[in-house]
Amino acid sequence: MNQDLSERLQQQVLNAANTSQPLQIKGSGSKIFLGHVAAGATLDVSAHRGIVSYDPVELVITARAGTPLRELEQTLSDANQMLPFEPPHFGLNTTLGGTIACGLSGPARPFNGSVRDYVLGVKMINGRGEILSFGGQVMKNVAGYDCSRLMSGAMGTLGVILEVSLKVLPKQAAEITLVNKTSLPQALDTMNHWAGKSLPLSAACYDGEHCYLRLSGAKTAVESARLLIGGEQHAASHAFWQNVKEHQHPFFQSEQPLWRLSLPAEGPPLDIPGEWFIDWCGAQRWLLSNSSAEIIRQQAQQAGGHATLFRRGPAAAHTETFQLPADGVMQLHHRLKQAFDPAAIFNPGRLYPGL
Amino acid sequence: MKKKPFASADEIKPALDKNRLVAKLREILPRDAVLFDEEDLRPYECDALSVYRKLPMIVVLPGTIEQVQAIIRLCFAENVPVIARGAGTGLSGGATPVGDGVILSLAKFMSILKIDPLARSAVVQPGVRNLAISQAVAAHGLYYAPDPSSQIACTIGGNVAENSGGVHCLKYGLTVHNVRKVKIVTMAGELITLGSDALDSSGYDLLALINGSEGMLGVIVEVTVKLTPVPARAQVVLAAFDDVVNAGIAVGKVIGAGIIPAGLEMMDRLAVQAAEDFAQVGYPTDAAAILLCELDGTHEEVAEQILIVREMMQQCHATEVRTARDEAEREAFWKGRKAAFPAIGRLAPDYYCMDGTIPRKHLPYVLRRMAELSIEYDLRVANVFHAGDGNLHPLILYDANVPGELARTEAFGGKILELCIEVGGSITGEHGVGIEKLDQMHLQFNDEELIQFHAVKHAFDPTDLLNPGKAVPTPKRCSEYRQLPTQGQNRSSQNGAQQA
């Protein structure tokens, strides 16, 4: 199963570049819903797979882009380690490459950091069909521009990710979740208050009625934090957060458009009609709403953030997925796109129209 | 003027009239904020890597973002290179002037604009010192985590430009992990915001790209940093070893046990002896190496982990294991480590501080090769090592007044960086490439990769005016470099004592 298809993929990219034929880069297709479907022939990366190196003591794993995320996580788990950013899978065969390209992180994000925070190095094919390596397999590396972190969240528009090196961390010995009934404003205050203390917090969300605080760490540390924070202990902590991460929580079972608002964590609730699920201490707010994209994006922007149409639903089939950045930043997007992919063959339109 | 795609700074010679440029800059700035006499320019001729010196044409000291924009627009129109400068504590020559360029000092941007304890963030101007941020927010039980050795003096703008590290990176990350938002002025004079007050922003992660870009992509004019809760408890274990290999094994054991220390530092015999002579903190000077392992977090977890770490050290045949009993002893343990660079500096007229990263498992091999190279080049080397994240700081001792010794030092240093690449590491962990490691960039990156870097640069700065000639070598130098017998031959040879 494990095989290195770098050369074949490179040849496909070269052919596409020479004929200016667009390519739709595909792993398992688990996040095909995110962004508009790119035009072009499919470049299937999923068979380019396998863990290239992993030495638990070094806290680094390197794997090919098509490696299934569950295989990677199982390997780490066997060595009592984990991906600290808890990436959502949204499918059975989700690949590492798609995880990096989409740049999504799970409930631990505000405490452990994001996908890009753990990217140490990337091997990729650029739009000229060149195989390039950036970063490396060491924790500290400031040689050259940080092109590897740049690939995280770029939705495959800058190149084909071939291989990724990630920093990994030990799993925590104990985990519990404390549940407290409260209001939204109070929950935002509580979550951010505790996040500012020296406590083993690893997730914090609010489902509209209850605030959920997850504690992960040494048994004794978790226990003393439990006594300090108080509240009822969740009977199935792991399953709860798994469902939040994978959008299997009842909140997400809806036909309405699902918006992801990325906002300053401590900011007040926004006045947009719909149902809310607040994660990341308030920094990631999920909204089920039929309000117009303009209103949602305007409010998100005024509050210091942005809004992504995460799942369109039938009603919003033609709305753009991602919020456009400011003009100056958008110009840099176009110039960087040109720098990596001069013939504009990779995932055209997946992230922004015309990019 | 039409330029070649990879013209170096020396090749770009715009028809310049210094007096005319001074006059135009004085329309933007007060008289005392435009320096052009040689004696006023002298303090700006180098950064902390003082073997490289060059007088700039002009130094400007703006006080507002609007002034920065106006200066940059002027320089862009006149095709004049601009080099942003913070405190000048950089160790790779990243702020070295070019003779026909303007040094844009951000020294006047010294205000902390906002502290938000609930958001755990602070908005600061780029000239604010690293340590000053932590001091300003201490009352809220928060601090700014990255702590480069120069943190008393270095500024946050420079930290972002270099993606600075420190001794706590393994647990708390580098600058890139601790910055939420950066405002930059591009070479077109435009003020743009990268990142946001949320945890991410739409589109490409330009915030990650600007970190460590060595002043080549934009001038950093405002930084929003993430603040971290001060741990309830921090405690340090000191372990001595009579064999460096055992110390290396102990590092792996601690991490293998699932413990991520806040700091994990190693010093070799020469470094330990120098630090003890200098700081008198009670280090065991007969040890081949010592490890300092700091654990932080809640009282309970630190108490639990201290016991495990002590046990690990003993299993790895530590000759002595001490736990700091109180804050005073903890500070004493660290005092020696923090004084290591100046302490080693007393052993010779000059020293050259290297900075490379390796996968930890190769430490014994790298140290052995370094000892061999030390004999080969007839230069002493002391090692201070951020063992937790594989970041080596070999300090080569030399005397710049002995003819040829600096060149030999640079050649030795080059060999150490090659050694880092050989074992799968990097030529720089936290000091940056600057002009110091341009040659070794060819070892770590091929021409296609270097060309890609240049393309990224040109996306921000199409005419190569921002800090030209730094960080990324021109690909054509590749062949030239490989023909050079040593790297040091054509460089100036002035005193190179380092402050880190």
Image (cartoon, coloured by chain):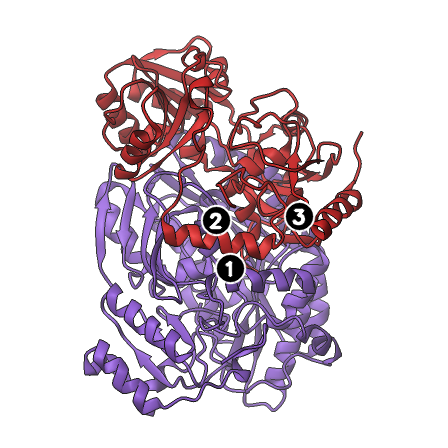
Chain colours: A red, B purple
Q: Name the residue under label 2.
A: B169
* Element type where label 1 sits in the image: loop
Q: In this view, does B473 lie to the left or right of B155?
A: right
> What's the residue type where badge 2 is placed?
Cys
Which of the 4 image quarters holds residue B229? top left
Could you tell me if the residues under marks 1 and 2 are in contact, i.e. CB atoms within 8 Å? yes
Q: Residue furthest left?
A: B30
> What's the residue type where badge 1 is placed?
Glu
Please state the horizontal and vertical placement of residue A51, each as a whole percent of the image.
Answer: 72, 36
Please state the horizontal and vertical placement of residue A28, each as a whole percent of the image.
Answer: 66, 27
The answer to whether residue A162 is above or below residue B470 is above
Q: Residue furthest top?
A: A235
Chain where mark 1 sits: B
Q: Name the residue under label 1.
A: B430
Residue A124 circle label: 3
| Front in this rendered view, residue B489 or B22 | B22
Could you tell me if the residues under marks 3 and 1 are in contact, i.e. CB atoms within 8 Å? no
